[in-house]
Image: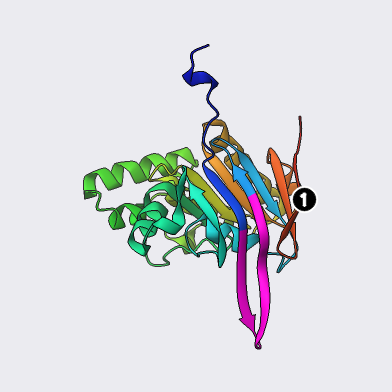
Amino acid sequence: MSPDSALPSVPLVRARDLVKRYETGGEPFHALDGVSTEIQPGEFLAIMGASGSGKSTLMNIVGCLDRPTSGEIAFEGVPLSRLDDDELAAIRNRKIGFVFQQFNLLARTSALENVELPMVYAGVRPAERRQRALTALERVGLSHRARHKPNELSGGQQQRVAIARAIVNNPLILLADEPTGALDSRTSEEIMELFTELNRQGMTIVLVTHDHDVAMHCHRIIRIRDGKVVTGSPVRA
């Protein structure tokens, strides 16, 4: 064994004592109250909790969409508190993919054009954008619907387009907030099988869910209650 191979790997995300506090009606409310956790490269992690438990707040901080009131979060070993808003935006665009419950597709543009959007913001040339978008749609099994608009696609197909858009820049981590919440059970299962395949290909995936059946597809579950981590355990050995 070489000396380097004995060194511990740096977590993709490391959170320490995260607090997120809001004022509601003049009273402080802790959306997060001392959360510490790590996300390793290649993990498939579920964050579970009831509505208002703090799970989406944690995902927003991990995704560089929000900053904690106190505590520290590091991405690839770099404390995010050291970065300005432009640097955080660059991480969001190049290293993090987002999938949401309601798909958030542009209604008047094709599936292909929706998938191209992150590359437009990244300054990728049109020919390369088109090829990479087609490749992403092929990865989610939807290349044959590239020219269709969202209203011509089923809910599951729209979510596949959203996933293709999230992975088109080859992010280091994919964050999915209730990605099956608007889908029926059969389509939800198909979407979770897609996430499982992307994870097998090496993608780190973190999803927020209140659905136990969805969480059971993951390798590890973190449960949050009242802004605190109450359990964190592997789903299977």
Name above or below for residue 103 compared with residue 201: below
Q: Is residue 22 visible?
A: yes
Report the span colored magenta: 18-36
The residue sitting at 60% across, 67% down in the picture is: 20
Q: Residue drawn 37% across and 64% down?
A: 85
Query: Residue 78: where, in percent of width, then height?
Result: 44, 47
Q: Classify residue 119 as left or right of residue 223.
A: left
Disc 1 element:
helix
Answer few, some or many: residues within 10 Å of disc 1's Cα (few below 14, many 20 plus, some between 14 and 19): few
- Residue, disc 1: 212
Q: Is residue 105 left or right of residue 224?
A: left
- Residue 81 lies, with reference to residue 39, above or below; the image says below
Q: Is residue 26 left or right of residue 72?
A: right
Q: Amino acid at mark 1?
A: His
Q: How is the model colour-coded?
A: rainbow
Quarter in which the C terminus is drawn: top right
Which residue is pictured at 33% across the width and 42% down the height?
Answer: 132
Give the x, y percent position of residue 108: 38, 67
